[in-house]
Image (cartoon, rainbow, N blue to C red):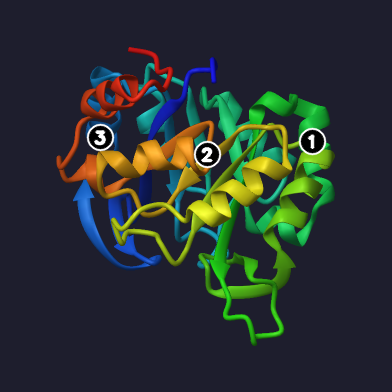
Amino acid sequence: MNKEVRIIPCLDVKDGRVVKGVKFVNLRDARDPVEAAEAYCQQGADELVFLDIMATLENRGIRLEWVKRVAEKVTIPFTVGGGIGGIEDMKDLFALGVNKVSINTAAVENPTLVEEASKEFGRNKLVVAIDGRKNPPDSDLPRLEVVVRGGNESTGMDIVEWAKRVEKLGAGEILLTSKDADGTKEGYDLEMTKAVAEAVSIPVIASGGAGRLQHLYEAVALGKASAVLAASIFHFGELSISQAKSYLKQKGIAVRM
């Protein structure tokens, strides 16, 4: 594997503050988004993801003023998601200096948006975020199922099939979060990550469940992810970006030091 694996901290933003929960609930305050963004740039993060996590649930667009404050300070590629409903929303974000946009529920509800955005801005500007959960074998639902609206709504869609479809429609990468693993610090859902990564040729960012350095390595070595996204371990100072990179490098994974 020659391509460098990216380490991406995630800012889940609610009411203008970075928060972190477990399995998408019980959110606790972590820090100010601008302060967090500046710190991660200095620490050597490869990219940053900013998600307005309540936008879709509150049926509103993304809060541009929050994004603007971060965009003014950030010195690395910066992806924004949450409440993006159409091409105009994306234009507003790109005008603020955002590098990529991430759509999730909007892509499921209107798959042609993926195609339109890819044509309008180019594949490399478009991330499709997929939230997934595992279902028991007797549930009549796909074992690996796409969920939307902050993980609250079942879609009945198989994750691998959806991932292949968004790649065809023009997504440049997939941000894959396991709702079951999110915030648990027990490791990424390797089965889900590997299933998606092996089914598509675009990069897959593993998200949900990082608790130890070993988990980052497993996401790449076993889950075949091209990038690892984490929140709690970085926000609460349990691990630094440089520790993560040094560890992966020792394990033979190419990273940008």
In the current view of this chain or complex, which residue is farthest to the left?
A: 237
- Mark closer to the chain start, 2 or 1: 1
Q: What is the number of the mark on residue 170?
A: 1
Picture coordinates of residue 209 (x, y %)?
A: 36, 54
Image quadrant where one finds the C terminus: top left
Residue 88 numbered mark, or none: none
Q: Quadrant of residue 248?
A: top left
Q: Secondary structure at mark 2?
A: strand
The residue indicated by pointer 3 is: 36
Seen in the picture, residue 91 relative to 164 is either above or below; the reply is above
Q: Using a 10 Å C-alpha cutoff, classify the residue at mark 2 as few (fewer than 14 neighbours), some (14 to 19) or many (20 or more).
A: many
Please say whether residue 61 is visible from this viewpoint: no
Whichever of labels 1 and 3 marks the residue nearer the N terminus, that label is: 3
Where disc 1 sits, the SS reads loop
Vertical comparison of 130 with 5: above or below: below
Query: Where residue 211 sits: x, y (%)?
Result: 26, 50
Q: CA distance from mark 3 to mark 2?
A: 20 Å
Nearest the viewer among 21 and 251 is 251
Q: Which residue is mark 2?
A: 205
Label 1 environment density (alpha carbons within 10 Å; few <14, some 14–19, many ≥20)? many
Look at discs 1 and 3 and give the one toward the viewer.
1
Q: Earlier in the sequence, mark 3 or mark 2?
A: 3
Picture residue at 26% right of the left edge, 21% below the top = 246
Cβ–Cβ under 8 Å for marks 1 and 3: no
Q: Give SS at disc 3.
A: helix
Residue 24 position in % (x across, y down): 40, 65
Quadrant that contains the N terminus:
top right
Q: Nearer the viewer, residue 58 or 11?
A: 11
Expressed as whole percent of the image width and height from the top left, the position of residue 250 reads 29, 21
**Residue projecting furthest to the bottom:** 138
**Spatial separation of the CA atoms under disc 1 and disc 3:** 31 Å
Question: Residue placed at 68% from the left, 51% from the top?
Answer: 85
